[in-house]
């Protein structure tokens, strides 16, 4: 029996001592569904090992709908902590398309001597924290997610940052997702919002912002968060269907390089049984494999 050590009261567990690819899949998957985030300390994987591990959970996506992959590795996204384009914004990966990733893996290649951690939040615990009246209200809401918003606005006017903004929004996506998503494996309900969620269907911009900020505060309560302090070679696996994450911009101009591999997911389903739908853009077929897209 694989022993995962809990590292947070509501989210997160870690494992040290073996190649993650050698662990029994059912035990790893059960631990993931329970803890939402698994940290494999000193996993020591290379790109091929990370791809092989992620593929145990399903068909892989391409690296990103708009951002280029690692050279020669179409399924690996380089996550570099370059000034002006850091992801210090709470989000769930790629929710601006109809079928966001099921799972994400991050592997540390280069980490700063201080800072550069990753925070991951349990959106199911956040949903359970809601007062009954607010929970019932959230159950009925749908939100518009888009890649064309402040997440991709550079925080400096360097040529590299401006070019990243241009690439990130090269294809514009707007997708309607349920604010409360029902997890396809556990049946848990979680707040499916985060930074890409910019509007509530049927409400004004100011009303949408107020409601999204209120709900988001429940997601990012300290008790719902685990902080991962990276060491080179660490691998993190998180359930993208029921978490959000954030990378604090607290390491100056020091280098930080991670590689991300994501597993193709299905279209989110709301409490009423309806699935997400595209408002603008395509079905991201170049990003989500055809077999996974057909299943959704």
Image (tube, rainbow, N blue to C red):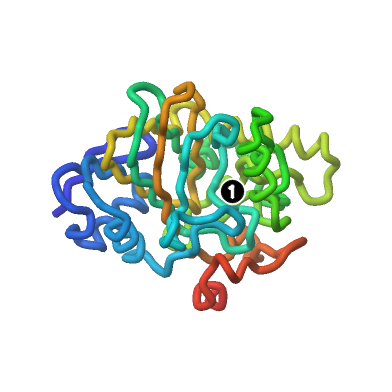
Characterize the local packing of mark 1: few (<14), some (14-19) or many (20 or more) Cα atoms within 10 angstroms: many
Q: Secondary structure at mark 1?
A: loop
Q: From the top left corner, tell me how far across and down residue 155 is, in percent.
A: 65, 29
> From the viewer's perspective, is residue 81 above or below residue 261?
above
Total numbered circles: 1
Q: Is residue 151 left or right of residue 209?
A: left
**Residue at 61 percent of width and 56 percent of height:** 66
> Which residue is at the front of the view, 149 or 68?
68
Res. 233 visible in picture: yes
Q: Is residue 8 left or right of residue 63?
A: left
> From the viewer's perspective, is residue 32 above or below residue 83?
below
**Residue at 72 percent of width and 47 percent of height:** 148
Q: Is residue 12 left or right of residue 126?
A: left
Q: From the top left corner, tell me how far across and down residue 233 is, in percent.
A: 26, 42
> Which residue is at the front of the view, 247 or 207?
247
> Which residue is at the front of the view, 212 or 189?
212
Which quarter of the rendered picture does the N terminus lie within? bottom left
> From the viewer's perspective, is residue 147 above or below residue 171?
above
What residue did someone put label 1 on?
192
**Residue at 42 percent of width and 50 percent of height:** 260
Residue extending furthest toward the right = 204
Q: Quadrant of residue 274?
A: bottom right
Res. 182 visible in picture: no
Q: From the top left corner, tell me how far across and down residue 172 is, in percent.
A: 73, 56
């Amino acid at each position: 029996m694989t022993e995962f050590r809990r590292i947070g009261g509501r989210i997160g567990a870690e494992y040290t001592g073996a190649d993650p690819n050698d662990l029994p899949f059912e035990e790893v998957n059960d631990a993931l569904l329970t803890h939402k985030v698994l940290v494999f300390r000193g996993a020591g994987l290379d790109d091929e090992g990370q791809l092989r591990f992620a593929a145990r959970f399903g068909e892989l996506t391409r690296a990103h709908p708009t951002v280029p992959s690692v050279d020669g590795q179409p399924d690996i996204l380089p996550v570099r902590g370059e000034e002006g384009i850091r992801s210090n914004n709470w989000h769930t990966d790629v929710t601006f398309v109809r079928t966001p990733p099921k799972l994400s893996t991050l592997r540390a290649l280069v980490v700063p001597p201080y800072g550069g951690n990753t925070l991951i939040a349990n959106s199911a615990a956040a949903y359970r924290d809601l007062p009954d009246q607010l929970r019932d209200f959230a159950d009925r809401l749908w939100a518009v997610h888009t890649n064309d918003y402040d997440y991709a606005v550079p925080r400096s006017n360097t040529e590299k940052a401006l070019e990243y903004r241009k690439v990130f929004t090269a294809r514009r996506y707007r997708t309607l997702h349920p604010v409360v998503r029902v997890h396809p494996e556990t049946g848990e309900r979680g707040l499916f919002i985060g930074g890409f969620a910019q509007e509530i269907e049927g409400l004004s911009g100011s009303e949408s912002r107020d409601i999204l900020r209120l709900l988001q505060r429940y997601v990012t309560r300290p008790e719902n968060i685990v902080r991962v302090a990276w060491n080179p070679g660490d691998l993190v696996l998180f359930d993208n269907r029921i978490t959000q994450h954030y990378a604090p911009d607290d390491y100056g101009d020091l280098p930080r390089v991670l590689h991300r591999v994501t597993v193709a997911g299905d279209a989110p389903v709301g409490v009423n049984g309806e699935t997400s739908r595209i408002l603008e853009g395509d079905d991201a077929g170049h990003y989500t494999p055809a077999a996974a897209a057909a299943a959704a």
